[in-house]
Amino acid sequence: MKFSFINDIVDWLEPMDYETFWEEIRPFCLIMLPREKCDTDIANGDVDEETVLHVVKNLARVELASILELEWRVDWPEETIH
């Protein structure tokens, strides 16, 4: 996977469900919450899967953007470019 901007990471992460997320990020060896902790918190009813997924996707986005030294792509309206 090639990312040019942080927006590309967001677009890549967005459609992933919980299982897919953990499979897809494995090759990147990111330093973030361990899946085992997330699974335990969900199983114990401490937090719902949707919230965990939202948090870990954001952590992954920040970590990947930092590693790859990416910035946000800003799409300016054409009339402001001239």
Image: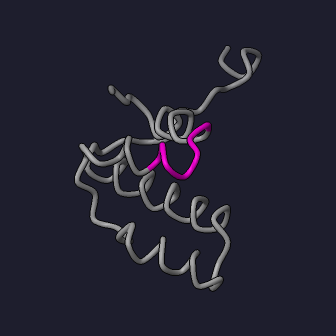
Q: In the visual, does 61 lie left or right of 42?
A: left
Residue at 36%, 41% (x, y): give it. 70
State the image quarter where residue 32 is shown. Answer: bottom left
User: Residue 25's spot in the image, x, y percent?
Assistant: 35, 46
The C terminus sits in image quarter: top right
Residue name at image x 57 percent, y 59 percent: 53
- Is residue 10 highlighted in magenta? no
In the rendered view, does 32 fall on the left or right side of 6? Answer: left
Magenta part of the protein: which range? 15-21
Q: Tell me what residue is drawn at x 59 percent, y 33 percent.
A: 74
Q: Is residue 1 above or below residue 22?
A: above
Q: Position of residue 14 (x, y in %)?
A: 60, 40
Q: Is residue 20 magenta?
A: yes
Expressed as whole percent of the image width and height from the top left, the position of residue 40 reads 48, 79
Spot occupied by residue 2 in the image (x, y as percentages of width and height)? 33, 26
Q: Please give the count of numbered marks on the rendered protein.
A: 0
